[in-house]
Amino acid sequence: MSGEGLRAKAAIVGVADAVSPTGLLEGSTRALEVQVIREALEDAGLTIADVDAVCSNLSNGWAASLELAEYLGISPRWTDSTQTGGSSFEIHVEHAAAAIALGLCDVAVIVYAATPYSSFKKGGPGFGSRQAAPGPTPVAEWEMPFGNRMPMGAYALAASRHMYEFGTTSEQLAQIAVDTRQWASMNPRARLQELITVADVLDSPMQATPLHKLDCCLVTDGAGAIVLTSAARARDLRKAPALVLGTGTCHTHAMISQMPDLTTTGAAVSGPLAFAAARLSPAEVDVVQLYDSFTITVLLLLEDLGFCPKGEGGPFVSDGVLAPGGALPANTTGGGLAYTHPGMFGMFLLVEAVRQLRGECGDRQVPGAEVALAHGSGGVLSAMSTVILGTEATA
Amino acid sequence: MSEAILVDVPAGVGERFRPPTSPASEPFWEATREPRFVIQWCVPCDRPIHFPREACPGCLGTDLDFRAASGRAVVYAVSVMAKPANPTMDGRGPYVVALVELAEGVRMLTNVITPDPYSVVVGDAVTVAWEPLTDGRHLPVFVPVAP
Ligand SMILES: [Zn+2]
C-alpha cells in the first residue's frame, strides 16, 4: 500500500531561501527564519494570517514548532516538530500534504535556518551548534571512543563497502563533484563557482579514506522556507503550483554502526513508495535534487531510487549524466557540495525542485521540467524521504 | 581461549573519550576489566545483540544474557582518519576506524591497531585486542590476524 490517495491533493505554492557566496549570513537564526517565511508567503501571495500549520525541526529550547509559532505570534491548529536531520523538510512536506488532504489544516509553513559558519568564525561550536551535547547515549558508548570523524567518517565507511562490493572507484565518485560544480558555475549565489576536474578532487586533501575534501559538502550559513496549501487553493495563488505527486519515507538506523547494509539506504523503500503514489517511474523524472552531503550519498541514492541498478552507480555517473546537458540533471543549484550546506540541506532541495518546475532558474534551468524529485537524507544515511513534485500538467 | 592481546596506549596521545556505561551494557564493560570479550544474546531468539539493550530488538523480550565471544571478526567497512576526529585522538597519526563483523554475526565500530593503517582493507581477518582505559576497563579494539 502506498500514499496514492495523496496524489496532487496538496501543492508547494511559495518558496524562499537565503544564501550567500561568502557562506555567511547576517542575523540570528530566528531573524533568518522570519525573513524567509515572509519571502515565501509573498512568493505565494499569502500572508501570515493565512498560516494555520507550522513545521520546524530545530529548537532553541525544547519544542521547535511551539517556539517558532510563538515567535511568529500565531496559534496553529496543526503542528510538526519532526527532526530527522537533513531529511526533516521532505518528511514535513509528506506530513503537511497528508494533513491538508484530510482537511486538518489549510496553509502550512516549513522553515529552517542555521548559521554554523558564522558561529565557527566567532569561536563557537560551528557545525555542532544547535546539536545536543554528548550524553549517555549509544553513540557515546559505542562510537565516540573510536574517533570516527563525523559525519564524514560514516560516509567513508559506506564508500569503502561500496567499493569493495561493486568495484566503485574514487574517480567515479569525483565525477559527481565535477558535474555538480558545473551546475554551481551557473548559479551566481553558489559558494564555489570555479569549475573543477576529477584530478582536482583526487588531489584535494584526503579526509577519511576514501573521501577527499572535494567529496565533502560545504559548511555555510543558510535558511529556507516553503508554503504548502491544497491543490484547489493553489490554483488561485500567485505562482504555478508544484503539486505533491508522491512521497515516501524510511529510516533504518540512527548510528552508522547499526545501518543494516552499508550499500543500501532507506531510499530503496522511500523511493518506490513515492513513485507508486505518484504513478510514475524514474525514467519520467526530468530533474533530481539528491542530498549530496558527500559524493557517495548521491551514488547510493541514484541506485536506491531506481535510476540505475544496485551496484552500477559508478559506471552510471562516470560520463557526466548528472551534468548540464546530461540525461539526468541533478543538483542544479550546485548542491551541498558547492551551493550551500548549513547542516541540513533538505530544505534547499525542495526550493530548487519547485523553482525548476516554475521555470525560474535562469542559466541553470532544465528546459521543460515537469516532474522533479527531491530526496532528503538525514543523520548518517539514516532517515530517507522522497518527494516527487509535478506541474499542473502532470496532475 | 587463548591469552588476551593487550595493546599499549601510544606515548603522548590524548586520553580517549571514555565510554559511559548504561544498565544494559554493564556486564560487557565489567568483563573488559579482566579483559574478557562478551556479547549479549537473546535466549529465546538464540541471537546475538549489539549494542546491548534492555530488551531484544527481535522479540522485545527481556530474557537476555552475556556469552563469551570468540573475538574473531572480519573487516566489513574501513576508513583511515587522516587527522584526528577530535582532541581525544590527538597524537595517534592516521588511524583506522572500522566496522567489523564478529564471527557471532553482529557488527561493531572499532579501531584496527596496526603500524600500517593504509594496509587495512575490507575482508581482512582481525581479532579482538584491548587498550586500557584510565578507569580499569579496556576498550575492545582489533588487530590484524596473520594470513
Ligand atoms: Zn529475542
Image (cartoon, helix red, strand yellow):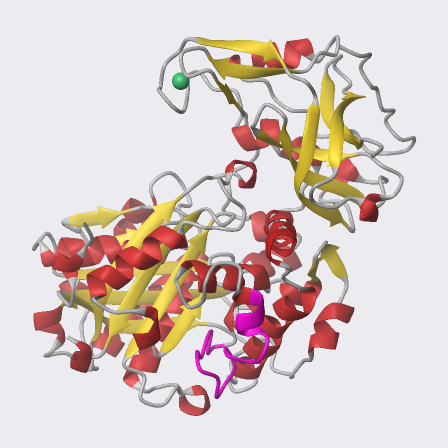
Q: Which residue is at a point 50% across and 86% down the rendered structure image?
A: A324
Q: Nearer the viewer, residue A71 or A107?
A: A107
State the residue lying farthest toward the right. B11
Residues A200 and B17: in front is: A200
Q: Residue furthest front?
A: B147
At horizontal 13% and vertical 65% (from top left) the residue drawn is: A9
Residue B140, quarter of picture: top right
Residue A265 visible in the picture: yes
As rendered, which of A8 and A4 lies closer to the eye? A4
Counting from the top left corner in percent of width and height, residue B46 is at 46, 15
Which SS does the magenta portion mostly show?
loop
Q: Position of residue A204 (x, y in %)?
A: 75, 68
A239 displayed left or right of A113? left
Task: State ligand 1's quadrant.
Answer: top left
Considering only vertical position in the picture, is B18 above or below A296?
above
Percent from the top left, x then y, of residue A61? Answer: 40, 41
Taking the spot 34% from the left edge, 74% from the top edge, the residue there is A283
Asked if residue A326 is among those painted magenta in the image, a careful observer would answer yes
Q: Residue at x 42, y 42 (%)?
A: A252
- Left or right: residue A72 versus residue B27 is left
Quadrant of res A200: bottom right
Pick the front one: A151 or A35:
A151
User: From what the image shows, is residue A327 above or below residue B116?
Assistant: below
Image quarter (top left, top right, bottom left or bottom right) of the C terminus of chain A: bottom left
- Mark count: 0
**Residue interval drawn in magenta:** A314-333
> Does residue B41 show up magenta in the picture?
no
